Image: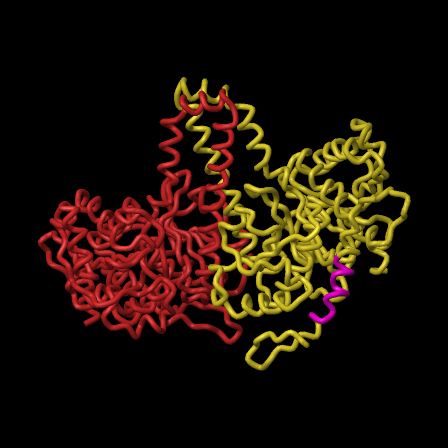
Chain colours: A yellow, B red
Amino acid sequence: MSETGSSFSETGSYTLAIDGMGGDGGPEVVVAGLAIAADRHPSARILLVGDEAKLSGLLSRHPRAAAICTILPAGSAIPMDMKPTAALRVRDSSMRLAMDAVAKGAAQGVVSAGNSGAMLALAKIVVKTLPGISRPAMAALSPTTRGDVVMLDLGANVSCDWRNLVEFAIMGEAFAKAVLGLPAPTIGLLNVGSEELKGDERLRQAAEVLRGSALARQFHGFVEGHDITAGTTDVVVTDGFTGNVALKTGEGALKMAFTLLRQVFTSSLLGRIGYLLVRPGLERMKEWLDPRRYNGAVFVGLNGVVVKSHGGTDAEGFAAAVDVAMDMVTHRFTDSIRDRLAHMEKLTSVKVTPDQQAVPAS
Amino acid sequence: MSETGSSFSETGSYTLAIDGMGGDGGPEVVVAGLAIAADRHPSARILLVGDEAKLSGLLSRHPRAAAICTILPAGSAIPMDMKPTAALRVRDSSMRLAMDAVAKGAAQGVVSAGNSGAMLALAKIVVKTLPGISRPAMAALSPTTRGDVVMLDLGANVSCDWRNLVEFAIMGEAFAKAVLGLPAPTIGLLNVGSEELKGDERLRQAAEVLRGSALARQFHGFVEGHDITAGTTDVVVTDGFTGNVALKTGEGALKMAFTLLRQVFTSSLLGRIGYLLVRPGLERMKEWLDPRRYNGAVFVGLNGVVVKSHGGTDAEGFAAAVDVAMDMVTHRFTDSIRDRLAHMEKLTSVKVTPDQQAVPAS
């Protein structure tokens, strides 16, 4: 069952299973987002999973969305605050049935704006982890002065060992290839200094393994917090705790900058005139940094594409998450990780000496 | 010896020992910084430690600095890349002699722009850790939309247990009182979500202990990355790895915002005119976010005030680090942590059950 997750027809038409009930805005936002997505991906097919009456009512108001959607009725929805263990016991939830569709091969990817913890738990159980990957990670794009950077893990794994970090590097590299279209993305390991001796044993071991791996030429070494937005590397690898804090801290800092800018432009008449003059440039800058543009975090390392939309996003943000899922599916992201893992088979035979130092197998 | 570190005369005159040789800019930047500091703290006395010939030559060109400085000759200087263990063996370094002055009570605080690792190691050995504190932490101010926030640890301890985090909360609270002048600063524990069950055991234990402590009313609970710049709490507590990454990520994001803004204002003639109109407001914003204004990280938990200036700062930045040291000394920061620890004595008798759950002693 799990093997069929990424097999799909060669006709160029891809199917995404969409959880119609997830997110703070519920089905209204999802269907409005699908209407936007339908324009961008007219040949996509959508399995829209959830409350049939509600969804068909909404689709009748969004004919563009209706044109690409088929409703898959689901008896229940996972509440945003339900614990993952409880969510696993609900067999007829829209989130579960959407995952089932991927596991059965009826869809190549799933998008949900619902409960993240439940989503990760269901993805592991239903879509299943790729052979050779011990734990899926959450990856997403983030803006830099030079383009976009892939960051992972963003919170799926609060604590990680060196093996997880190496796997994240492999998956992040495949992600950057699929979504950013880079032929040989560079990889940085997030640390508190760029010198080889900085950080903990876990980081030094991961770095040592990567230096001796097939990714050696793309591995840049350690990077620091400011390197994320500087675009020093195309991929930044870290544990889920640090990644989550870094992502939210960066977003918070940008939000502060915009708050202060608003004060500059509204506190005086000259400021207001100045605003009118620079407005087009400011709008472009705001658009570049718009969190909605970066909506759509991917649970990587699974037997299919699983995309988490922010729960509080709007239709535009949800459409961006659908874009990410389509990018991953059309670029055969899952297959690309699978290939990379086959080449990195040595990794699984890395020996760990008693003092926990990683020694790549010769 | 260590007990005298915070005892000082009641005449209102405080002495700081300044490492004259530290930092990328060397003695030139230090002395130029002291010239600025002399205007702000005319009654301060400075023990300027380092190469006598070089420092006296510089002082002769900065009469304002000379008026408050006495040179304490040192035979050597710690290079920026020397390992802490090696630095500890150099007995006549300017950094060492400055720390000695604090330990002997000849000065109440020390400021250096030198090698951080060496500084922390020397501070632990020479100035010594306060009784009741297991590890010193690095604390500094950071900008928010509502004022400044105290963040710690910023890198002194790459990994921490719950006890360290609780100690950081105690020290951060005292720091916020001394430097921000707040009567009852609020404290947040940095996590990947604000719900009680988020994060790892270490964080949940620290939160539980704080909720049952004398700081309970000031403890806000868990905060997330975006809460740092939102100013949700006055103090944000985290381990040194996460704190270092968060600080640098936030700085990086602001730098990106300014880079993009520069493009907005320089890419067209209208942009340039707009810039002229909003320039005063932008300058204020830039000043508010200026990393130099936040220069001066404090190693807290020691028997005296130890301030680390950024190695790459200029004279203005170095003067800001001197400001921080003066604030800490005049507000009797060390005594205030000592008092707080006495009130929190219960903390040291917290029981840890076999499953590592913290249970505050009744």
Please identify the quadrant where the C terminus of chain A is shown. Answer: bottom right
Q: Is the magenta region chiefly helix, strand or loop? A: helix
| Residue at screen point 82% across, 49% down | A108
> In this view, which residue lies farthest toward the bottom?
A354
Q: Nearer the viewer, residue A54 or A314?
A: A314
Q: Nearer the viewer, residue B124 or B144?
A: B124
Please identify the quadrant where the N terminus of chain A is shown. Answer: bottom right
A70, above or below A10, in the image: above
> In this view, which residue lies farthest toward the left?
B11
Whole-percent x and y of residue B328? 25, 53
Whole-percent x and y of residue B147? 36, 40
B72, above or below B294, in the image: below
Residue A338: image quadrant is: bottom right
Whole-percent x and y of residue A166? 64, 64
Residues drawn in magenta: A337-347
| Residue at screen point 90% across, 47% down | A10
Q: Nearer the viewer, residue A151 or B192?
A: A151
Q: Nearer the viewer, residue B259 or A292?
A: B259
**Looking at the image, can residue B178 be seen?**
no
**Looking at the image, can residue A322 be seen?**
yes
In-image side of B90 versus A159 (left or right): left
